[in-house]
Image (cartoon, rainbow, N blue to C red):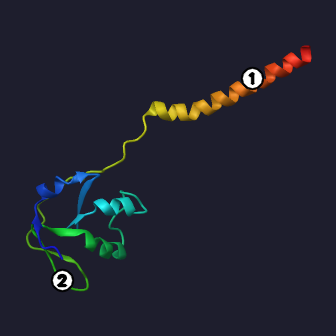
Amino acid sequence: MATRVYTLSQVTQHKSKKDCWLVINGRVLNVTKFLEEHPGGEEVIGHSKAAQKLLLKYQVGVLEGYTVQDGDSKEVGYKEAKSNEMSAFLIKDDSTPNSAAVLEFFVPFLVAGSYFCYRCLTRAAQITI
């Protein structure tokens, strides 16, 4: 198991989709590859005991101020008071522009409406002839 100690500032440098680190219970995890495979997406990570055991293979170290106790529980104990807090970053895919979404919605209606008008006009022309 990795025993390297990282500070909060070191962990916050890894916040992109191609290089993403998390801290769960004092363990520093490089979850970049895990994000691609996770069925719930990037928003849901570390939710069950089975998932936490799975994440242990992504551990690259521990957070400064925490000690990892070996054993069955795999719990993390505090070495000093929990005084450091870190803001979280949410990594999301670039969404499509609103204009593209509007086009995807209205273009099929425009095509269907044009076809309907064409059919009505050609029928009207056949009736008058």
Label 2 or label 1, whichever lies nearer to me, is 1
Which of the 4 image quadrants contains residue 23? bottom left
Report, in whole angstroms, how far the alpha carbon at label 2 lies from the one at label 1. Answer: 74 Å
Question: Which amino acid type is shown beneath numbered disc 1?
Answer: Cys
What residue is rendered at 65% in x and 29% in y?
111
User: Which label sits on residue 83?
Assistant: none
Q: Residues within 10 Å of mark 1 (few under 14, many from 20)?
A: few
* Closer to us: 44 or 60: 60
> Which residue is disc 2 drawn over?
70
What is the tally of numbered marks visible in this picture? 2
Quarter in which the N terminus is drawn: bottom left
Left or right: residue 23 versus residue 127 is: left
Q: On the picture, is 99 further left or further right than 23? A: right
Question: Which residue corresponds to the image point at 34% horizontal and 60% vertical from the top-left?
Answer: 35
Looking at the rendered image, the quarter that the C terminus falls into is top right
> Which of 72/128 is in front?
128
Picture quadrant where residue 65 is located? bottom left
Q: Position of residue 52 (x, y in %)?
A: 31, 73
Helix or strand or loop: what does disc 2 sit on? loop
Looking at the picture, which amino acid does disc 2 mark?
A: Asp
Residue under label 1: 117
Is 14 situated above or below 122?
A: below
Q: Secondary structure at mark 1?
A: helix
